[in-house]
Each structure stands twice: as structure tokens, then as C-alpha cells.
Image: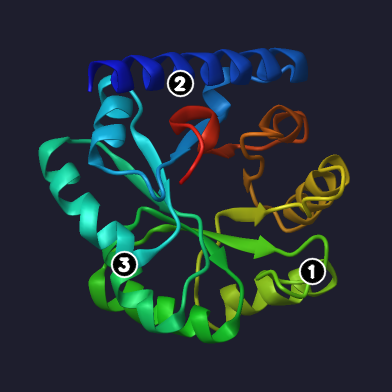
Amino acid sequence: MADTSRTIAQALAAVDAEIADACREAGRARADVTLIAVSKTFGAEAIEAAIAAGQRVFGENRVQETKGKWPALREKHAGLELHLIGPLQSNKAKEAVALFDAIHSVDRTSLCEALAKEIARQGRRPLLFVEINTGAEEQKAGVLPEQADAFLAQCRDTYGLEIAGLMCIPPLDQAPAPHFALTAKIAARNGLKLLSMGMSADFATAIQFGATHVRVGSAIFGARH
């Protein structure tokens, strides 16, 4: 455990320094960027090490996995924030609203309807991000860029959802900068302040384009099995 804790603490410090450098270069305050430590597939030991090193915001991909490991961790540690960064099925909306402080993958009307119902029922209001499929990749979730404005209006007007920001995952085989720029442009014209952009390999670039939340997993916890 001591070795794991030391390694994760060192990795977190390195990532934090890189975020601070990127913010300085972009003329932004370090406080404007939230680091989401993506703990999907990692167990409580690794998460405890990150918490011990001062990390408070975590990201998970699946409702089921989150249910298995987070209630006990949250009971033990106050002030933790949990973000769902993976796709969400409409039938899991009830559990997602109960478990998460932010949901980054709003991308279709059936999910909007389910979320609106659960938010009203539970009285919990997680931060909501609409996912934009900037590369128009068939296998990937998300709203197409040309449909984003209409979808955001629908979220607000039809379902009464308060959307806080946008999220994107650029195609692996393309330079991320144009995808971050496009997402930032859509957010700006819709008056959205939050941008969930950038992962381990490209978060410094995302910060240049205005990312407010960066999702970093392997650079903190190591390679996934």
C-alpha cells in the first residue's frame, strides 16, 4: 500500500504541475480547472491513495461499478465529488442521479426525459454536461455538432433541464485541438460556462481551449488491466 500511495501521490503532483503550467501559458487561473481523477476499473486501495494525496473529485464510467465501491468510500471521507463520464442508459437514470454530482454524457431525448423525472423526484441536481460527438463517429455516443444548438434548446425548453456545459472526446486518430475549439465555440454561443475536455494525453491542449474539467486516469493511476 505504501508504494501504491507514494506512486499515486507523485503522479497526482506531476499532473497538477502540468495543469498549472498549461493554465499559466493560457493566461488562466489554476483554480479555473478541475482535475477529475478517473478511477474506473481501479479499486478502493488506489482511490484511498489519491484521497490521501488530497484529491477530492473522481470520475467513473459505469453506474454498476460505482454502486459497488463508492458508498463506503463516501461514508468514510467527507467532501468527495463523483462524476459520471461514461455513457448512461435511460433505465439507469434513477441510480445515476442518486450517486453522481455530475453527469457528462447527456446525449438523447429519452435520457433527458428520464433525468428530468428523477431530478424532480429525488430533489438532487447533478451538474449536467451534453456530450458532443465532434468527429461524427458512428460508434461513439454524443450529439452531432450541427444538432447541438437545437438539442440544448430542447433540454431547456422541453425537459426543463439546466445544462451546465459540454463534453467531448476527440477521435483517437485526429489532432484534438480542432475538436476542443469546436466544442468551445458551441458552448460560447449557447452561454455555457463549463467544458469537460481533455484526458491524460491531451489535457494541456484542452486547457488552452478553455477546458474547465479535465478527465485524467492513466497518468494518475497507471495503465488499466
Q: How crowded is mark 1: few (under 14 residues within 10 Å), some or many (20 or more)?
A: few
Compute the Cα span from label 2 to label 1.
32 Å
CB-based contact (under 8 Å), mark 2 and mark 1? no
Q: Is residue 22 above or below residue 62?
A: above
- Disc 3 is placed on an element classified as helix
Instruction: Indicate which disc residue 137 carries.
Output: 1
Q: Is mark 1 on a helix, strand or loop?
A: loop
The residue drawn where x is 76% and y is 31% is 205
Compare residues 30 and 154 and report the one nearer the observer: 30
In the picture shown, does residue 60 fall above or below 95?
above
Please report the residue visible at 77 percent of the width from the left and 75 percent of the height from the top: 138
Q: Are marks 3 and 1 in contact (CB under 8 Å)?
A: no
Of mark 3 and mark 2, the one earlier in the sequence is 2
The local crowd at label 2, few if under 14, some if 14 to 19, many if 20 or more residues have their Cα within 10 Å, is many
Upstream in the sequence, badge 3 or badge 1? Answer: 3
Q: In this view, does 42 lie to the left or right of 75?
A: right
* Tag 2: amino acid: Leu
Number of the label disc, if any, that sits on residue 12: 2
| Residue at point 44%, 32% (across, down) | 221
Quadrant containing the N terminus is: top left
Looking at the image, residue 57 lies above or below residue 189: above
Q: Residues within 10 Å of mark 3 (few under 14, many from 20)?
A: few
Classify 2 as above or below 170: above
Spot occupied by residue 172 in the image (x, y as percentages of width and height): 77, 50
Q: Which mark is residue 64?
A: 3
Q: How far apart are marks 3 and 2 (CA)?
A: 26 Å
Residue 213 visible (yes or no): yes
Three-letter residue code for mark 1: Glu
